[in-house]
Image: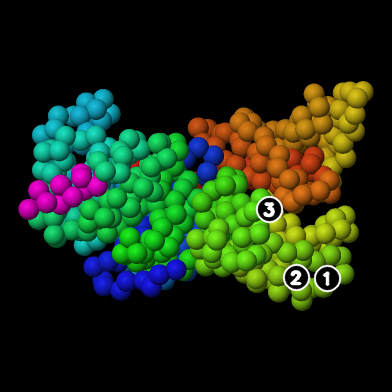
Amino acid sequence: MTAQTTSSNDRVIIFDTTLRDGEQCPGATMTFEEKMEVANLLDTMGVDVIEAGFPIASDGDFEAVYEIAKRTKNAVVCGLSRAGAKDIDRCAEAIKPAKQGRIHTFLSTSPLHMKYKLQMEAAQVYELVISSVTRARNHTDNVEWSSEDGTRTEFDFLCKCVEAAIKAGATTINIPDTVGYAVPEEYYNLIKSVRERVPNSDKAVFSVHCHNDLGLAVANSLAGINAGARQIECTINGIGERAGNAALEEVVMAINVRNDKLKYFTQIDTTMLTRASKVISAATSFPVQYNKAIVGRNAFAHESGIHQDGMLKNAQTYEIMRPETVGVKQTSLVMGKHSGRHAFIHKLEELGYKLAQNQLEDAFVRFKALADRKKDIYDEDIEALVDQEIAQSHDRIRLQSLTVIAGTHGPQRATMKLNVEGQVKIEEAEGNGPVDAVFNCIKALVPHQAKLELYQVHAVTQGTDAQAEVSVRLSDDGRSVTARGSDPDTLVASAKAYLGALNKIVRKRQRDLAAPAAAAS
Ligand code: KIV
Ligand code: ZN
């Protein structure tokens, strides 16, 4: 609500790590296509640096970073790398096509990590800091160095490593709170003291990277900025390892709304925050907590009579920012079965979707089918439908039909028809309950080893005719994938969600197999 400051010294660089720290957390695996969509959105909304992945981790990761580097128009595209020569060289190769590329190399510096994780002496770690940054700097002049577990690192050693990294050519220095242990005052003092102590600290931008194990990631990040850091590493919806990272939407809006106290600015288009949250939630199938700051479903809802009365008299009584500022539109009763193609396209534009012609046609057919079954269709229904359309557009296994016999006299039985890579297959299976019968059908039609880790049902809107939204998480070969399916019939939604996760696994395997050839081209 206050005017933004404009001195370049007050500009905070937004470094988004949704596709790296976010994607590496259990269940958040995204497909190649989803990563492209997310990167494009981040670039459009004004993110300064996109950490696109960890190229050495797999051929699929490499290929995603390479392609994002090729496609990104404005942002710096960054790849993560450990300190080894092979890691750094692979990372350099992945970011090569970028207009502006960055190598982000990291090494643990805390006594605990050096002893147990690295099994190295401090002197060896120090030498490796120098050799890794030097190697990265031979590939590009945009190099970030991170002292992993920085907040639990012995202060003198931290300063010594930071000084050496800058001397070796690092242009950004990140001091992460890797385990989310710091409190704001402590983190402020750490960043300030390192900047004061290290003689060449003025030659690098300092960065903050805070995990949320104590729920302090955003507070710590802002404290770091107050101490002179000028880059915040964050993720959409705060997804990330364990309790996650600092949420991008929260740091950006804190700076925006409390500009009287936090006299900085970012170049994020805040009206895209809600859309970004939804895209990430759809891609990862991680639901957004209802009361999540800025982007939660209830963030701008006023339930109590006293609050509603105040809001009607003057919105500022209970609102510190206007919902439009973050891209929230009033939930509206949108359409019904008489709505035509034009109205549907208009609504999609309003919700921020840009679909290819064939996706649009398919989505419209689905919308009509939904409208035949459900009287009132809300924005959320359209979003669930289109997110599913986008997610399924590359699917190799598709649901054609499902019939389930359920009730008090078991066993429950399901009959399912699937289109598997163009071939129609049909199977019948029994189960301990209708959902079990549905999943047994899928296992019979597409034999696989993946294990079901999570099964969750939500209602998209209210009422008994609301669409069910089912989340399914499968784990395969040490990695988990999550997918969602929606339908007015909970069992159909369950089948779609399970098949969505299976499709992600199939695509990931095929990408990993195909990647070396693609990357070389
Ligand atoms: O949390 C952390 O320390 C990291 C580093 C790789 C920057 O993610
Ligand atoms: Zn991290």
Say which residue label 2 marks: 344
Residue 85, quarter of the rendered image: top left
Is residue 56 rendered to the left or right of residue 517?
Answer: left
Mark 2 vs 3: CB contact within 8 A: no
The residue beneath circle 1 is 339
Q: Label 3 to label 1, Cα distance in Å?
A: 34 Å
Q: Quadrant of the N terminus?
A: bottom left
Q: Amino acid at mark 1?
A: Ser
User: Is there a contact, CB below 8 Å, between mark 1 and mark 2?
Assistant: yes
66 displayed left or right of 483:
left
In the image, is residue 329 above or below residue 175? below
Q: Residue at x 52, y 67 (%)?
A: 325
Is mark 3 in CB contact (under 8 Å) with mark 1? no
Q: Range of the magenta residues?
A: 187-199
N-terminal of the pair, mark 2 or mark 3, is 3
Residue 12 on the magenta segment: no
Badge 2 local density, few (<14 within 10 Å), some, or many (20+)? some
Which sits earlier in the primary sequence, circle 3 or circle 1? 3
Task: Say what amino acid the circle numbered 2 marks.
Answer: Phe
Residue 298 appears left or right of 106: right
Q: Position of residue 250 (x, y in %)?
A: 44, 54
| Pick the front one: 37 or 259 | 259
State the predominant SS element of the stretch in magenta.
helix
Residue bearing mark 3? 305
Residue drawn at (54%, 64%), measured in percent from left and top?
316
Q: Secondary structure at mark 3?
A: helix
